[in-house]
């Protein structure tokens, strides 16, 4: 939603769910999905992900905002597949397409935390992400599991884990201006009319001069 602050506009993106084709914003947290065998799910929930040694986007943990992408992994019987719902703190994101394809597997060496391959560049019409540091990922739910007993057991593990806060979550602090949880401090600006210090991501700002 565009917001006008005495001459400039800012766009506030509080959604944790990205629309198809929408580029992830630096330092935001988003909901994504990861497919795994039901025998591996307990260890992932309890101890975290183990990054793959390679893949389309090189080493890292693969996930997607599109659950249909996650439903294709791993190659096992459908009843053995579990889709984990994740909260991913993407950090600094590199969009892989066009001229950026030369960084397809070396993006982390250039200082990026996550690589994003849009659906238009994936070749299969489904986007995917690769996260370098598994500590940026938290399992928050079970999006798909055909075995109700297994699903219940996994959800109990998630609940147990949520009771002990992930130390990395402490890096997310509320902005003093807008209140949004973010890793990086928002740059405070001066209202061009009343000179009050405001955050461009605030829902609104009532200019002090206009009150008089």
Image: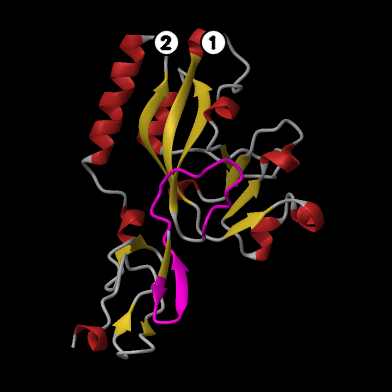
- Identify the residue at image location x=60%, y=43%: 129
Tag 2's secondary structure?
Answer: loop
> Image quarter for residue 149?
top left
As for residue 23 lying within the magenta part, the answer is yes
> Image quarter for residue 183?
bottom left
The residue pinned by badge 2 equals: 146
Quarter of the N terminus within the rendering? bottom left
From the top left corner, tell me how far across and down residue 144 is, in percent.
43, 20
In this view, the residue in front, 25 or 9, is 9
- Identify the residue at image location x=38%, y=68%: 201
Is residue 54 visible to us here?
no
Is residue 50 visible to us here?
yes
Q: Which mark is residue 191?
A: none
Q: Which callout, 1 or 2, points at the residue further toward the start of the chain?
A: 1
From the top left corner, tell me how far across and down residue 73 is, in percent.
59, 23
Neighbourhood count class around disc 1 (C-alpha, 10 Å): few under 14, some 14–19, many 20 upward = some
In this view, the residue in front, 124 or 209, is 209
In this view, the residue in front, 73 or 123, is 123
The residue pinned by badge 1 equals: 78
From the top left corner, tell me how far across and down residue 143 is, in percent.
41, 25
186 above or below 157? below
What residue range appears in magenta?
4-25
């Amino acid at each position: 939603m565009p917001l006008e602050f005495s001459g400039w506009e800012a766009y506030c993106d509080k959604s944790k769910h990205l629309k198809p084709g929408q580029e992830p914003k630096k330092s935001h947290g988003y909901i994504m999905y990861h497919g795994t065998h039901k025998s591996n799910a307990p260890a992932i929930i309890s101890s975290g992900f183990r990054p793959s040694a390679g893949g389309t986007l090189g080493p890292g943990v693969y996930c997607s905002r599109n659950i249909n992408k996650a439903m294709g992994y791993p190659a096992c019987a459908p009843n053995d597949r579990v889709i984990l719902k994740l909260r991913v703190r993407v950090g600094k994101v590199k969009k892989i397409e066009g001229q950026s394809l030369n960084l397809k597997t070396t993006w982390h060496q250039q200082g990026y935390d996550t690589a994003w391959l849009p659906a238009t560049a994936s070749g299969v019409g489904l986007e995917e992400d690769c996260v370098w540091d598994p500590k940026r990922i938290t399992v928050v739910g079970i999006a798909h599991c055909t075995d109700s007993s297994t699903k219940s057991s996994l959800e109990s593990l998630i609940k147990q884990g949520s009771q002990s806060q992930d130390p990395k979550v402490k890096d997310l602090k509320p902005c003093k201006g807008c209140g949004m949880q973010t890793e990086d401090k928002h740059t405070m600006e001066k209202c061009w009319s009343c000179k009050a210090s405001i955050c461009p991501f605030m829902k609104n700002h009532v200019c002090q001069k206009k009150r008089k």
